[in-house]
Image (cartoon, grey):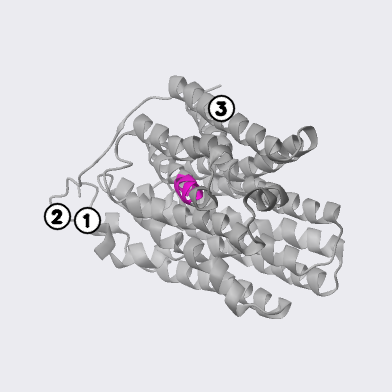
Amino acid sequence: MDRKWLTVIMNTLVVASGFGTMHMLEKFKDVVIAHYGITEAMMSYQQTAYVVGLFVAFLLGGTSLFKGSFKRSVALIVSFAAIPQFLIPFMPNWWGIVALRFFQGFIVALVAVFSNQIARLFLAERPFAKGIVLSGIFWGGIYGINLAKWASHSYAGWKAVEVAFLLSAIVMFIMLALWWFFVEDFEIPKEKHSAKGANVWKMPFTWVFGFTFFPALWIVFTLGSFTLHNVDFSDAQLANLVMTLEVSMGVWSIIMGYLGYRLSLKNTSNRGLFKAIVSVMTTSYALTFLGLFILWKGISANDYTLALLGLAITGIVQGTGPAFWTTAPAAYPKEIYPEASFALGLISNSANAVAPNVMFVLVHGVSTGVTIYLGMALLGIVLLLASSRMKLPVEELGDAA
């Protein structure tokens, strides 16, 4: 296998092992509630902390924390997930676990630093490579869920939590060690070397395009729980719905990444690559509409087959991800696109910080919820069309910014 594509596979495995932390604690809900004597509402705080951590990770991306040595940055990010994973089973206080879950959310910074690496390795192939890496988020979710299920069946009570968390932490460090030997290091600039004083935050394009991915993340981070809370299916059927959504998003990430690659081959100029990005994201949002309508019908009729089909199609919303995360190297001068990756990530991932709570407050019925989701998909398309009419930063500043 070509070394570049081997690097992509290794990146994907690191992402998958890290994102195994995403839902694992929830799968031990009854054990955790009994162990700490907390309420279900208090239990939900750990997931809220994790999601807020996802957002803060991009905020920190503008600092020197995840800059300098690429390999050091990846090791630091993985440690933010793995060390708390070691500590969680032994925390005497519930609020300590909530704090550790916040730091585990920093694992999402892998998305931005791997985007910088892929931009160095590929050109037209960037969306495909990124789609494979991003699919690791969902393979990781599946891995974490199944590891928790295995531990629950093999061990009783809190022992199951200890085994699952310690084993997954060890896996993270093993994957990091293997990855370390396969990849080459490079420097992520700590300072912008811009003769023109370019500031990605002062560019209108950054804000408009940054929000094109906001609707997708709104849907990704809330659709599963929204669906589960509005259907009356068996536990096995509910588990299948969760698994279907995770698999769907992983598969669509790869498929739409490949489509982005094929479209990018037609024109590898900055504008040509950006047109491919907009096309893939717009197509993903348009097909998300179809999936949402089918899901709406399935939930309203309490029809398991339709709900399953709706989720399988709606998972294409994640097809926006590979294209979005290849935007910075296509649209910004090479000296500032690493910073632009974190800026775009921060703007789009603000959805993580607000969507779950807003949906909880505003949504009191299925129709209201699905209408919001449809509105989000439409917003994504409108913003994409608006951004396609703007000058790219690289066109305004040149590649020597």
Label 2–label 3 contact, CB within 8 A:
no
What SS does tag 3 mark? helix
**Disc 2 marks which residue?**
196
Which residue is depicted at the point 55% across and 62% down?
216
Amino acid type at image mark 3: Ile
Vertical position of residue 288 compared to residue 366: above or below = above
Label 3–label 1 contact, CB within 8 A:
no
Magenta includes 101? yes
Residue 397, disc: 1
Q: Nearer the viewer, residue 138 or 210?
A: 138
Vertical position of residue 180 compared to residue 135: above or below = above
Q: Residue furthest top?
A: 181
What SS does tag 1 mark? helix
Which residue is depicted at the point 34% across and 64% down?
205
Q: Residues within 10 Å of mark 1 (few under 14, many from 20)?
A: some
* Quadrant of residue 209 within the rendered picture: bottom left
Quarter occupied by the N terminus: top right
The mark that comes first in sequence, 3 or 1, is: 3
Q: Which residues are magenta?
A: 99-106
Main secondary-structure element of the magenta-colored stretch:
helix
**Disc 3 marks which residue?**
170
Vertical position of residue 258 compared to residue 177: above or below = below
